[in-house]
Each structure stands twice: as structure tokens, then as C-alpha cells.
Image: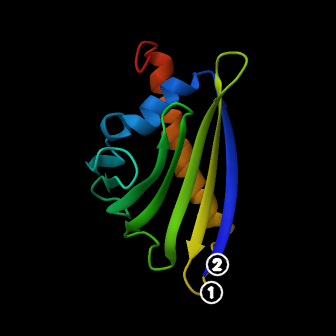
Amino acid sequence: MGVSSYSDEYSSTIPPARLFKALILDSHNLIPKLMPLAIQSIEISGDGGADTIRQINFAEGSQVKFIKNRVDELDEKNFWFKYSLIEGDGMMDKLEKISYEVKFESTADGGSINKMTSTYYTKGEFVLTEEEIKAGKEKALAMYKVVEAYLLQNPDAYA
């Protein structure tokens, strides 16, 4: 099994509490509304905390039908979230899992710095290409930007 980690950092004018609520705590409600052409629904099995399963069902016509994420840790006070992609019809034949660690931190100007580390656990001798990693990052960033735009347009949402 191979292990590779990659980190990214994004800045936003939105405070960490609002981004955390929208992107993490209420994503199962908000994301399908904002991205109906990409995501059909997000189903939750559990109380939202550790060991909760989130199944993301993609819209008809998508290459991937669904993925399942398991919540590993959730710290609402410090805006920190760790979860693992454990099942799906994408590349799971080549991956054991992908673990994500997300942290939202305050900035002096009232905005936030948002850090994400992705750790890929591959099966056998499989090695992820830069293109595959870049494609995953772009999808995550696109969802982040859609939610950020929504929060900017709706200053009372998740306040």
C-alpha cells in the first residue's frame, strides 16, 4: 500500500464559523440545493459526529454514481473536521481510502484561512498521477467557491 499526502490552503473574506456551518455541518442540505446539476442528494447515517456515514449521490449522467464518506473526527469549537472517503464507484478499485483533514482558521481581517490535507492510501503498486490529484482538488475547490459565493450573497445565512 502506498501513502501520499497533499495540502492546500485557501483564503476567504467569510469568517470560519460561517464556512464551517455551511460546508461541513449543513452540507447535506445546502450543497444539493446549490449544485443540483452535480449532486442529487447527501444522505446521513448517524448523528453527524464520529462514525457518521455521508453518502453523496451524484446527478444522473455523472461518471460517478455515489461516494461514501465516514466522519472520523468533528470539532465544532475549533472548526476542524477529519473524514475518509471509504466507498464509491470512482477509483475505489485502486484506493484503500482517502483521508481528508479540514481546518478553518480566523484571520485578522475577519475572514479565514482554510487548510485541507488529503492523504491517499493506494492499493498494491498503484500510483496516483498529478492529473488525478489535480482533478480531485478542482472538484473540491469548485464546491468551496459555490458555497463561498452563496454566503457572500446571503450575509445572514449561517451567521
Crowd class of label 2 (few under 14; some 14 to 19; many from 20; radius 10 Å): some
Q: Nearer the viewer, residue 40 or 3?
A: 3
Q: Nearer the viewer, residue 138 or 151?
A: 151
Image quadrant where one finds the N terminus: bottom right
Q: Nearer the viewer, residue 105 or 129?
A: 105
User: Marks 1 and 2, how far apart in space?
Assistant: 7 Å
At 56% across and 43% down in the image, what residue appears? 141
Task: Specify the amino acid type for callout 1.
Answer: Glu
Q: What residue did someone put label 2 on?
A: 2
Ranked by sequence position, the earlier of labels 1 and 2 is 2
SS class of the residue under badge 1? loop
At 58% across and 87% down in the image, what residue appears? 124
Image quadrant where one finds the C terminus: top left
**Rendered image quadrant of residue 108:** top right
Q: What residue did someone put label 1 on?
A: 125
Tell me where residue 82 appears, x and y as whole percent: 52, 50
* Pointers 1 and 2 in contact (C-beta within 8 Å): yes
Tell me where residue 112 appears, x and y as whole percent: 64, 27
Crowd class of label 1 (few under 14; some 14 to 19; many from 20; radius 10 Å): few
Residue 63 visible in rendering? yes
Q: Is residue 73 left or right of residue 131?
A: left
SS class of the residue under badge 2? strand
Residue 35 visible in rendering? no
Tell me where residue 150 appears, x and y as whole percent: 45, 25
137 in relation to 91, above or below? above
At 59% across and 67% down in the image, what residue appears? 120
Single out the mark in the foreground, 1 or 2.
2
Q: Which mark is residue 82?
A: none
Task: Specify the amino acid type for callout 2.
Answer: Gly
At 65% across and 16% down in the image, what residue appears? 110
10 in relation to 122, above or below? above
